[in-house]
Amino acid sequence: MGTVIEQVSLTDGGWRTHHSALRLAVNAAKHCLHEAGRNAHDVDLLINAGIYRDRNLAEPALAAMIQEDIGANPEDPHEQAHGTFSFDVSNGSCGVLTALQIVDGFLKSRAIDLALVVASDADPGHGMSEDFPFSPAGAALLCDWSDDARGVERIHWINIPDEGESFSATVGLLDGRNVLRFAESEKADELFAAAAAQAAEACLHASALTLDDIDAIVAAPAHSGFRAALSAHMGFSETQIIVAEDQRTHTASLAAAFDRASAQIRPGGRVLLVAAGAGITAGAALYRMPDGTASRQR
Amino acid sequence: MDLVSTHLFGTIADTAHHLLLHDEMGTSKRNVPDGATAPPRDQPRVEGPCDDDRNALTFGRSATHDSRMRTQWLVEEPSSGGPAAPFRTRVAGAGRCLPTTRLTTDDLMSTTRHHTHIDLERLTGIHERRVSVGEDDSYSLATAAAVDALHRAQREAASLDAVISCSITKLRDGLTQQMEPTMSSAVAHAIGADQAMTFDLSNACAGMLTGVTVANNWIRQGSIERALVVSGEYISQLGQNAARHIRNIMSKELASLTLGDAGAALLLERAPTGSEGIKFAGFTTVADYSRLCLAYPKGHEPAARMFTDARGIHRAAMANTPLLLHEVLDTVGISLHDIDHVITHQTSARAIRKGMAKMSAYFGESPRHDAVITVDRYGNTASTTHTVALIEELESRHIRPGETVALIALASGLEIGIVLLTLDEELVERYGHSD
């Protein structure tokens, strides 16, 4: 019983989208809805987990703009109809997992029937960033509820506070301009993997399962170093750890990894969703695959 | 920081600027490939090749859900037909941190580069606001408020299951906006809540009430036991930036002059059903108005600048809030007069009074007390305003145990949210009031 990912869609940066997280998210969301045969008005909750966006926008929530652009009940409220609620969450590579936890609560309580989680990042460009490390990429996940054994189970979180030493990003004045800058430790992958392994072990322990019960680990971030370190920490074959194809995908990386997993894992198979990011924060949750999550990349 | 007053209109020049922003952030509508657009609402759902897959993936309740028509606009837990929540969320503590420096509206307006002829205090009712003069930032304000909330609740930080930071500003070490790691992880670590799950939530000035809505949902279902919803807004820099650009009353940056700094935190925890606590939480986003207020770093000025079509937002909020409040009252089964205290987002005393007058005319009755106004003393403190005002009312001994408080969020998005709650004697007594 839990949240089921009904459909996944991914977008990458074309010439018109590579500087716009908004466009990446909107394109992914529209494609996701279309592929699922759903109408945007069916979406009750829209959560954006992306971070790096057009103009480094602080307000409003980018989710509100995405809602408007996909046409999900953007009009004035009226009687005998339902609206859509949109907001942003931010938790680095763990953002999609955080959003799934929020969606799960709203679905479980029947406050909503259908949720759309989006995540996208793009270099704002135009002198507003310096050495932007991520690929322009977007993802959308359409989520609804299953009363049977499939879907997301309880998410377990681990914190190993490091004051941003492993990875940090800031926007501040540099030579009279507001610039987005990044700092990353060489040890980041190893530190993130250690945290991810702790979260994964806590998750398995709570479920009285072992790695033998898992078909694959679906992990973020997508760095090869993280994947190798996670494999070493968990004693789990690297070939069974599925990450996004593009190592430079950021907040969309868990969705991109899940998209690959849905094509590889047997229907009804069990995967472990694992994400780790700056903080250091890591989360893990078991996910029982449906009979076949639909996915397609544009 | 979204609604200033009906007197703050946009200029033609500013409107042109706004349209440019809209164009830059809104062209994706023209960017969607053929076939990727969802069918319009009044058309039947297209039966395409994906439908077999989709149907194969919809299980049990989801299939039932699809056939059930939702008739309430707000996203809210159903009053019937859904699983009964095993718990209620009680407000265990509320904390705030206000910088000690008071900046009067007269003093702020004396810093404008141009002679504006604006009587901002008369327009908004804001006499002064608290501002950090460098001693505090978003992080320190949030942390101090979190400590205050824990102290008021007499709870240990280690008992927190979740820390949700909901600020617009994430300024740390001065005027540097921290994108990663999260502000919530920093605050959690500072207060000793290292076991808590952490994430940041961003929803303009509705951030904290959105965080409350999420935490309430988890607590009611038993997913977590205790959560801290926190925000630190070091946002007065936007006012200083605006002072360099504003020329007259029509400026899109006029709303920035209303801003003040504050930290706020609400400690929410599990309580038995039937306890005093959160009775209702519902939200919607009227996204047709999502581009009416935009804030982002711009040019060579620190932090950010904010451009607001205050008239447009005000008009949209005034048009839509009564219907949504009506829906809430129907759902909960009370009348407007059953609400003892109304705390709206604090933008302008005149706008709040005018809005409440319209509400009273719509319903033919009024809440038991006049709407709470703290904007005259603290300005618009963005996502913290409701909590800052709630504590002001508690410390003034205006709120008694069991009285119904309506917190109404009106924020960029356009976000409209309503939280109804009652406070128990244990909490009210912590602020000095008892029956």
Image (cartoon, coloured by chain):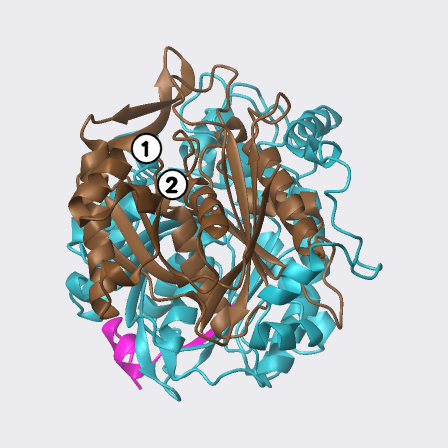
Chain colours: A brown, B cyan
Q: Are marks 1 and 2 in contact (CB under 8 Å)?
A: yes
Binning the other alpha carbons within 10 Å of mark 1 as few (below 14), some (14 to 19) or many (20 upward) gives many
Over which residues does the magenta segment extend?
B419-435
Q: Earlier in the sequence, mark 1 or mark 2?
A: 1
Which image quadrant: the N terminus of chain A? bottom left
Q: Amino acid at mark 2?
A: Val
Answer above or below: position of B340 versus A155. Answer: below
At horizontal 70% and vertical 34% (from top left) the residue drawn is B10
Question: Is residue B174 depicted above or below B331 in this figure?
Answer: above
The mark found on residue A223 in the picture is: 1
The foreground one among A45 and B100 is A45
Q: Is residue B146 above or below residue B273?
A: above
The structure residue drawn at horizontal position 67% and vertical position 50%, both measured from the top left corner, is A35
Quote the CA–CA distance across marks 1 and 2: 8 Å
- Please provide percent x and percent y for residue A77: 72, 62
Marker disc for residue A243? 2
